[in-house]
Amino acid sequence: RAQTAARFRLPTNSSLEPYFLVSTPPHDKLFPLLASAYGIAVLVLLAWAARDHWTSGGFGSPELRINHVRPSIGDNLQVSLVLPTRFNGTVQWMTLRLRCEAKDTSWFDISGEDPDTLLFEQREYLFRGVSVQSRGSLDGRAEFSLPRQLPPSSPAAETSNMRIVWTLYLEGEGNLRRSIKSEYILDIAPSS
């Protein structure tokens, strides 16, 4: 008791002294324990980053080009892709997928249901079983038709919670668990 009281400079008959005596004494071991936990967390993050680099690092940044500046309902949408590769191996498959969805963008949904409704989906395969070289590129094309009975994209300034969203997804897998997933929001105009 005298050591604890001297350490915190409390009077010997203080009413706080019993509270300081309840705490566990090995505080000198707490710092190495926290430093070890921090070191382990850093190693785990480095391992995760290395795994992410090796699994998805096989592809560069995709370059997509669309034949229209602002496509409209009823148009044929032609998409060309240039995708740099960073590995020697095989691309098992790669697709472009066009989706039109009615999405609920409200912050809070009291019903708890998922009201997103798929209105349209079209998938086009770009590649299947294609050999690639490091520092090479994949060139592909796909064509989508935008049906006339579907609604255009909701304007950005619209205040409604339900929005029409057109999205183009690029997905693919290569050997050694290399993969790519990208999505692009399209602004589809009403039919002209």
Image (cartoon, grey):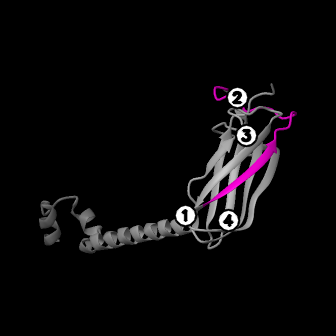
Q: The disc labelled 4 sits on which kind of residue?
A: Glu
Determine which residue is flagged by label 1.
135
User: Is disc 4 in contact with disc 1, using a CB cutoff of under 8 Å?
Assistant: no
Q: How many marks?
A: 4
- Distance between mark 3 and mark 4 Cα atoms: 23 Å
Q: The disc labelled 1 sits on which kind of residue?
A: Arg
Determine which residue is flagged by label 4.
173
Of 134 and 54, the residue lying toward us? 134
Single out the mark in the foreground, 2 or 1. 1
Single out the mark in the foreground, 4 or 1. 1
Of 44 and 185, the residue lying toward us? 185
Please name the residue shown 82% across and 38% down the image.
146
Of 82 and 94, the residue lying toward us? 82
Residue 155, quarter of the rendered image: top right
Circle 4 SS class: strand
**Nearer-N-terminus badge (4/2):** 2
Question: Eyeballing the image, is 120 above or below 159?
Answer: below
Labelled disc at residue 166: 3
**Nearer-N-terminus badge (2/1):** 1
